[in-house]
Image (tube, coloured by chain):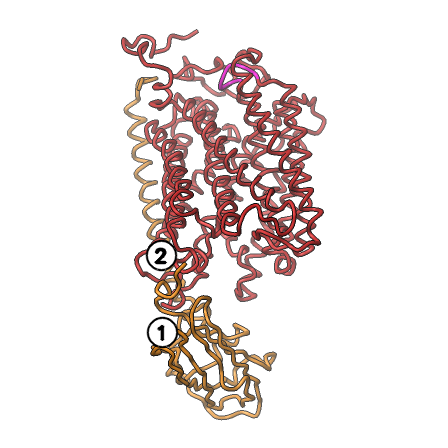
Amino acid sequence: MSVHPASVHPHAAETPTWVKWLTTTDHKKLGVLYLVTAFFMFLVGGLFALFLRAQLEHPDNTLFVREQYNQFITMHATAMIFMAIIPMLIGFANFAVPLLIGARDVAFPRINAISYWLLPFGALMMFSSFFLGGAAGGGWTQYPPLSGGMFSPGRGVDLWILGLHILGVSSIMGGLNFIVTILNMRAPGMTLHKMPLMCWTVLVTSWLQVIATPVLAGVLTMLLFDRNFGTSFFRPEQGGDPLLWQHLFWFYSHPAVYIMILPAFGIISEILPVFSGKPIFGYLAIAYSSVAIGILGFTVWAHHMFATGLPASIRAVFMFLTMLIAVPTGIKIFSWVATLWGGNIRFYTAALFAISFVAFFLIGGLDGIFLASIPTDVQLTHTYWVVAHIHYVLFAGSMLAIFAGLYYWFPKMTGRLLNEGLGKVHFWITIVAMNVTFFPMHILGIMGMPRRYFTYAPQFAPLNQMESWAAFALGAAQLLFVFNVLWSLKKGEKAGDDPWSGNTLEWTVSSPPPPHNFDVIPTVR
Amino acid sequence: MTRTHIPDPELTKRNNRMLMWLGLLLVGMGVFAWALVPFYQLVCRKYGVGTVPQLPNKNVVSTGIGSRTVTVHFLGLINAGTPATLEPLVPDMVVHVGETREVNYRFTNLADHPLEFQAVHSVTPPRADADFHKLQCFCFTRQTLKPHETKVMPVSFWVDPKLESIFNTVTLQYTLYALHPEKLVRR
């Protein structure tokens, strides 16, 4: 056992634990804070989703009025994307990356702490709008003129913009920190090509954050000016163009889709080899396909705009580039399958989530191809097919990977294992309820049910009813997970340093690791 | 705060230097975002797409009337929430390419206060826009209607013979946008 430098500090013993957590600059503690805060936001966003599903349980439901429904749908998406999934993945990056590369902390621990603390304040700014005359109701994409002063009066959209600004600054600072950390602070001997794949995906994600987020900040500021200071970036009556918003917004938001999935690819690439007892198949292919996805991600934004009257020649180019992304993604899927192939797979809960990620993320990839193709997109855009696609990518993709990561690294974070029995119940309810909730949305989309409405025609009722009940089961399963975490923190089985026979450096130190991570910086050969 | 390790001055220097370069990149991307606005308008103006109000192109003049005919449909729309009506006096016209014609639109202000507005044109199919030339149009400038006033205003235009032969019909549509919509709608 190493001597904690903190324990020799004369005042250290007097500092209460909660003050230590609130003032910490330790990447591991910040990682845990990110995960706890973002998981709470996941529950809040989930609650909004259940409001939506309750409203859609039968047609012409009077549970909520249209305006309330619009606010819930906007804040559901905003909370899940900007306050839950992205920060949870950043939380994993915070906890794991310095350990994975053999560093004592990130390059700028205090910037890291600010990045974290902006998250709850950004969230508070947005949620406060519910009590200040109503939240934004224009959907998370906030297309003008719907989000302009005429159709969205009140302060909701303004607070949404300011909150997103704060979260954006947090995201940018996080990205800066990880680029410097990964490029400058790897242990001696750890070349880029020896770096764990999680670090590759976090590196690419960080570049996306630094390059794309300033564009979001710009476009949000333009909307704020249009709403409050009489400018006309998006107001056609003054020579502006609402479509400009869509171009600039998706120039950020399409790379943001990869910010939400690349670290998930990294988590899966760490977990699958450990539980199949084989080295990862196609290390370089996975690493460089992540880079390829990052670069291509900047060239496909207009595929969100196929139905806006863009010239056919431009649309064809974007269709081609979008289809091209299937190549690096396919490389990854095949590499993961090849990693599992012939392996001695140990079906712990972490492994179950990781394997089901590969299976169900694939559905999200395949139904995306229908949207990438112009003729089918023109039919399916703005229907429930799009809702099915985004949930297979973000829930069956990012969230399953996040659960895999939580079951995998929880013992390293806390020193105790999560209960396997409860974990398996959580896994099976989640998988079944997820598919019953989201798969029928494909059928509803083909039937022509438009997305984002608070009511629907009677012929869509049976499938909607089924989805609503499955959504409630999905929500209940997540409470089981919360219980598992709280129970295991106190009574969970002691994990030891290396409960999974892991391959990476974090399993060589104690659980939880000492504040300085490594007594001696390891040398990688 | 407790220090968990002794900082390495050489590493700190390298980290700070890299942070500075990344900061420059960040500023560059911020400038890039704002520069996209004039760039977008430039592209729209060049290709005649988008809703940038089009000014008369003085360099293009009709070189003579051709025998080919094109049907031009006229439409008028009001942006939601604006108390006004807008309609063409004729629904469509059959015109010869190169021939200058005139169509009248009738505007009515339904409100008790003056209405300042901008009409924004759109041509369908969009590829025909560049070959649809306007010589005179109420859309070139902002217009004002007194309370409950009705006004008839003309558009004179000609269709370029270069118009792709697959297009037999072209739709010219105007949308009326109030310039101060915040004064019109109160919720």
Q: Residue at x 38, y 45 (%)?
A: A132
Secondary structure under tag 1 reads loop
Task: Give a yes or no on whether discs 1 and 2 share a subunit.
Answer: no
- Would you say residue A199 is visible in this rendering? no
Q: Which residues are magenta?
A: A411-417
Neighbour class for label 2 at 10 Å: few (<14), some, many (≥20)? Answer: many
In the picture of the structure, the residue carrying the numbered disc 1 is B112
The chain painted orange is B
- Residue B40: x %, y % from top left: 41, 62
Instruction: Pick the residue in front: A190 or B102.
Output: B102
C-alpha separation, residue under disc 1 versus residue under disc 2: 25 Å
What shade does chain A have? Answer: red
Instruction: Pick the residue in front: B170 or A60.
Output: A60
Amino acid type shown at disc 1: Asp
In the picture of the structure, the residue carrying the numbered disc 2 is A227
To which chain does the residue with label 2 belong?
A
- Would you say residue A165 is visible in this rendering? yes
